[in-house]
Image: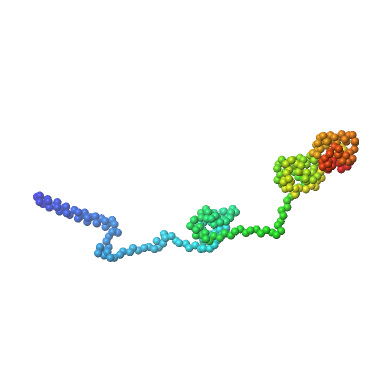
Amino acid sequence: MSGIQALILCCTLYVATPIMTRMYINKYRTEQYPDSINFGITESDSSIKWKPQIDHQQLNKYKTERVDYVRFRFNPNQLTSENATKLGIPKKAYTNLQKYLNKGGIIKTSEQFKNIYGMDSMVYERLKSMIHIQPPKEKVLSKHPKIKQQLTYDLNAINVKELIYKLNLEYKLAYRIINYRTALGGYYELKQIQEVFGMHDSIYARIESRLYLQIPHQRISIQTAPLDTLAKHPYLKYKNAKLIFKYREQHGVIKDIKDLQHIIKDSLQLHKLSRYFYCQGP
């Protein structure tokens, strides 16, 4: 082959190679991507507008459905499940509302209804103008109210527990009242408990109406009572008890308690002694 022929062959390959390569690529695209096939529409037919077909049924499947909830006034404390559904209240919020009401709770304000766990803020904004909470009915007082009767107790029979738990007295004061009653031989009037240490006027005024006296107090013969018995009584000091004992030995029979005026000079104390000591007969 001459040099001229070789040169012509090289030039021919140089020109033909790009053309053949482009034809091969177009054929490959047509086979692999059939959607790119030109269906006879040329560039000159650019005036034709292609409108794709829309599947409205498939589109509606993903479209958010709009719910038109019923509007009416409601009281959260009397809300039924059916009405809650009509109003669009979330099930979780309604369930928590019922739990709260079943435990004795009451929705008193719209803000309280808003704070129920599970309540959506957008739902509340839609419902807040429809919330109607009725105020609780006031109790009508009877024209003739029933008077609560309180139990009363005999001061000479009441025990420590009743003084503490029924009359609400302190432990120490209750025991002093009982011990003083034992030393006296029983109370002959209610005011005597004011002599007990710690019994203030305010306490006595509070419990006076709850006490009465029925069981009589004990009385002792001043003629036969031993010295120790006389000396232990709260209204007698040991010195006076000893003088009475000597007077009884010297004069024999004590006919009247007034015979002891020279020993018990306080008339009030002598009167108190006359309630507990007798001379010839009880």
The part of the image, by quadrant, that contains residue 59 is bottom left
Using the rendered image of the protein, determine whether residue 40 is visible from the camera's viewpoint.
Answer: no
Q: Nearer the viewer, residue 86 or 128?
A: 128
Q: Is residue 216 left or right of residue 8?
A: right
Residue at the spot x=58%, y=55% of the render?
Answer: 106
Using the rendered image of the protein, determine whether residue 49 is visible from the camera's viewpoint.
Answer: yes
x%, y% of residue 254? Answer: 89, 38
Q: Is residue 204 left or right of residue 38?
A: right
Q: Nearer the viewer, residue 106 or 197?
A: 197
The part of the image, by quadrant, that contains residue 78 is bottom right
User: What is the count of numbered marks?
Assistant: 0
Q: Nearer the viewer, residue 227 or 194?
A: 194
x%, y% of residue 177? Answer: 75, 42
Residue at the spot x=70%, y=59% of the render?
Answer: 143
x%, y% of residue 217? Answer: 81, 43
Q: Is residue 48 left or right of residue 181?
A: left
Residue at the spot x=10%, y=49% of the render?
Answer: 3
Residue at the spot x=71%, y=44% of the render?
Answer: 169
- Rendered-image quadrant of the C terminus: top right
The part of the image, by quadrant, that contains residue 199 is top right
Using the image, determine if residue 83 lies above or below residue 238. Answer: below
Colour scheme used in the picture?
A: rainbow
